[in-house]
Amino acid sequence: MTEQQLPAWADPAVSPALLDAQGVSRRQLLRRAGLFGAAFALGSAAMSEAAAADGYGGTDPKLAYLVGDHHVHSVYSHDAKYTFSQLATAAAKYGLDWMVFNEHSNFGHAHYGAAMEHKEILKARAENPRQLIFQGLEWYIPAAEHCTIFAAPGPHEVDLLTRFELAYDGKLLGYTDGAPDNPNTARNEAHAVKAIQWLAEQRRTGYVDDVLVFANHPMRLGIDSPHEMRNWRDAAPEIMIGMEGAPGAQGGGIPGWEGPDSQRGEYTNKPSVNSWAGYPENAYVLYGGFDWMTATVGGMWDAMLAEGKLFTITTNSDVHRVVFDTWKNGDWLPGQNFDNTGKIPDPVNTDSPQPGGDFWPGQFSRTHVGVTRYGYRAVMAGLRAGRVWLDHGHLLDGLDVRLKRDQDQGRGVTLGGRLRVRKGEKLTLDITVTTASRPNPQGILPGLAHVDVIRGAVRGPVSDRDTWKAPDTRVVRSQDVSGRTGTYTLRLPLTAGDESFYVRLRGSDGNRNGPGYLGASVDPHGPIPHAPGDGDPWADTWFYTNPVFVDVEGS
C-alpha cells in the first residue's frame, strides 16, 4: 500500500495559509488535543479506558475526530453512476478523511466487479494518500434490509467480501422472505445470524485484521424487526456494532425537485407483507432527517441502549445520483450488461440536471469518529469503541463530550465509554462545542440553537425481544445556546441514582421542532417530519451523539 499521508489540516508541512476556514478550525482542535503532527501520525492506536486507581471513575484519552462516510456507491453498483475519481475528488472537497465503497451485492459484482473494483481501490489509495479508502459491500440481509460490511485493508479484504456475498447474501440466495407467517422466515433470519458469526470468525482467526457491520436505513421498509436487530447485535457485538441513525438521499425532500410527495431519505414507503407489524405507519418517514428509530426519544435505539449495550449510530450519503448533477450513465456496448461485466459504463456529462436525491460524500451528512492516531485500523477501533457523533449541514466544527465524578481530576470518559460510580455520587457532564467557522456547501453559516441531554435507565436484557420502547428515557435538560460562537464548554450537573443509566446528546439549528413522537412529557422540542414535497434539508439540521454509560455499584 502507498504510504499514508496525514490530511492537509493535520499535516504540519502544510501551511495554514493553504487551508480553508474549517481546515484551520480542525487544526486548532487537533492542537488542543495534543495530537498534531507526529503525535497523530505515530500515536497509540489503543482505545482502551484507563480506570482510576480506586476502581471507580475513569479517564479516556484526548481524541481527534475524523470525518467519514460508510455508504458510498460507484460504477460498480448496478444503480449508481460515478467513478472512483469523481467520488474521491468530491469527498476531498467536502472534508472527508475516510470513506467506504460499499457496492450492492449482485452476481455481476461477485463474479466480476469486486475484483475489478479492488484494483481501482488500490489505485485510488495511491492517488489519494490523504484519504482512508475502504472496500466494502452492501449486504442484502436475509429476511431484512441492507447492511454495510467493510474490512481493514489487507491481502484478503476482497476475498472476504466475495466469499461472504456468495454464501450469505439474501438477494443472491433468494432468502428475502420475512413475513411472520412465511415458512422460510425462520430459516432466513437464522442465516443472517450465521453470516455475522462467520465474519466474526474471520477476524478471530486473523484472516482479516478487522471487519465491521452497520445496518442501513433500518426503517425505510420497516422489515428490520426489533428481534432481528437484537439477534444481529448479539451474534457478534464486536462486529455488528450499529446502524444508520440517519440515512442518505437527504436531498429527496428538496421542494420542487422530486415531486409533491417526496421525502428526505426517499422514505416514501408503506408497510408491506414483510414489514414488522408492530411499527406504526408514521414511522416510515424521517424526523429532522433522522430515522424514526433514532429520532424517537424512548424509541427503538433507546430500547437497545437501555439493555446496557452500546449500539452506534452513523449518517452518510448513500450516494448514487447527486441532486442537480448533470451527469448521466454511459451507454452499454452491444451484448453487455451488469450481470456479465460487474460494472456500468462510466458517466457522460450533459447540459441539464439529472434525476437524483443524494449529496456527495461529506457535502451534507458527516460521521465523526474519535481516534488517537490517523489510520484505517484507528478509524475502525474508534467506531467499535463508539466514539462517534453526527451532524447534518456542517452544523458544528467540533464536539467533545466528557463525563466524570466531581471528585476526579482526569478528563473523564467520553462517547461510547462507561463510568463506574457509587449511588448518589455527583457527576459533571462537560460538553465542549466548536461552532461552524464558515458557510456550509449551501452558503449558510449554521448556528446551533440548543443542546439537549437525554437520559435513560439501564435495565439489562429484555424478556420481549420485539420491544421497541424505553419508557424511562426522556429529555432531562435543554440548554439554549443561540448566538454563542467559537469554542465554549457547557458544564451540566448530574447525580447517580439507584440504577445504572446512560446519557446522550442532541441539538439542532432550531428551525423545526415540536413534541416528540412519544409526547411532550418525554421530548418537548424534538425533531418532526416535514410536509411531503417540502423538506429542504439545509433548513432543518441536527447533531446526535452516541451515549456515555454510567454503571452504578449495586444496581
Image (cartoon, rainbow, N blue to C red):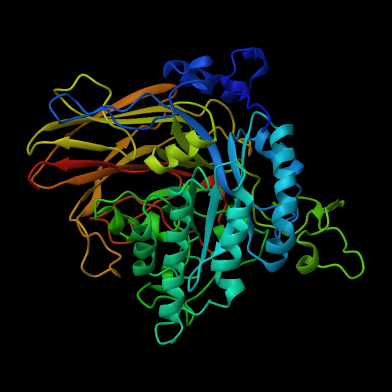
The extreme right residue here reads 334
Horizontal and vertical percent position of residue 550: 20, 41
- Asked if residue 224 is positioned above or below residue 32 in the image, the reply reads below
Horizontal and vertical percent position of residue 301: 34, 56
Q: Quadrant of residue 59?
A: top left
Q: Residue at x 41, y 72 (%)?
A: 190
Horizontal and vertical percent position of residue 414: 32, 33
Horizontal and vertical percent position of residue 523: 29, 53
Q: Is residue 254 in view from this perspective?
A: no
- Asked if residue 363 is positioned above or below residue 268 in the image, the reply reads above
Q: Is 344 or 22 nearer to us in this picture?
A: 344
Q: Residue at x 74, y 33 (%)?
A: 127
Q: Quadrant of the N terminus?
A: top right
Q: Quadrant of residue 364?
A: top right
Q: Residue at x 43, y 35 (%)?
A: 448
Q: Is residue 229 in view from this perspective?
A: yes
Q: How many marks?
A: 0
The extreme front residue here reads 205
